[in-house]
Image (cartoon, helix red, strand yellow):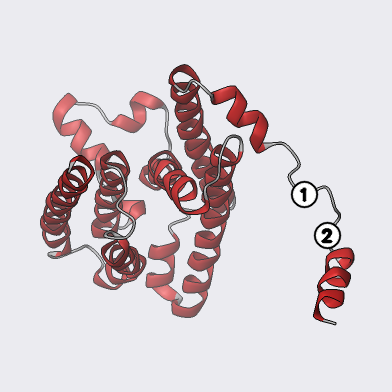
Amino acid sequence: MAAPNRLAAHHRYLGILAALFAVVWVALAIAPWHRADWALENALVVVFVVAVAVTYRKLTLSRVSYTLIFLFLCLHEVGAHYTYAEVPYDQWWQSLTGSTFNSLVGWERNNFDRVIHFSYGLLLAYPIREVFWRVVQARGFWCYFLPLDITMSTSMMFELFEWAAAEIFGGDLGQAYLGTQGDVWDAHKDMALASAGALLAMLITYGINRALQRDFQQEWAESLRVKEARPLGEDEIARMWNDRQ
């Protein structure tokens, strides 16, 4: 009964996070600064939340993964409410300390979008790793490299999505969604920060597992061992063709 009880606890925890996120979502859906941009920013959120809801019984993730996903979605909703380029974190900080946060750290632009891109890698790389571990059974080197690879590639895909949306909608909506703030290297920096966040998450995970997992070195070595010595490509096509005869 231990395993079913643990799964029930995970389901309850996910239900609590879902309820909290619903509260955050509704609160930040009220009077956003740019309604059209808010709707565009939430399109992928709806797809993602539905995917989690549909798959959670067959693939119940750890509470760590659900918490990381929850934190990222909450940060994203703040950006969607104000638009990423206009989140007034500087004013919030000034009201608390009397000086702006940008002047404290030497920033010259609104860098909330940069923080979120870094958080994308930092917070979502581990849930991606858990999926690779449990569904694909990636082990050793690959369960650290593949989450980094997926984070980098999806970050690139999102930049292409932003570009396409800006081209399609144009005008103020396109500019608000793109949020480059005049930086021609904005997309490159966003992808680099997402990659850095994912790399940091995987290094932390690597350090914890290396310290606690008894067969860590054996698993790492086994993951890099060649399992199929025969060449594929045209040789494999020939073998499959001969098997059909």
Looking at the picture, tell me which residue is in the foreground, 227 or 127: 227
Name the residue at the top extreme. 211
Q: Residue at x 50, y 67 (%)?
A: 161
Tell me the element at label 1. loop
Based on the displayed image, in which of its 4 quarters is residue 46 positioned?
A: bottom left
Q: Report the residue marked by disc 1.
A: 228
- Amino acid type, mark 1: Glu
Q: Which residue is mark 2?
A: 232
- The kind of residue on which mark 2 rests is Leu
Q: Is residue 55 above or below residue 226?
A: below
Q: Could you tell me residue 61's position as x and y percent?
A: 32, 48
Task: Calculate the distance from the C-alpha at mark 2 to the C-alpha at mark 1.
Answer: 9 Å
- How many C-alpha atoms fall within 10 Å of the one at disc 2: few (<14), some, or many (≥20)? few
The C terminus - image quarter: bottom right
Residue 202 percent location from the top left of the image = 49, 33
Q: Is residue 183 visible?
A: no
Percent from the top left, x then y, of residue 24?
14, 54
Name the residue: 57% across, 46% down.
146
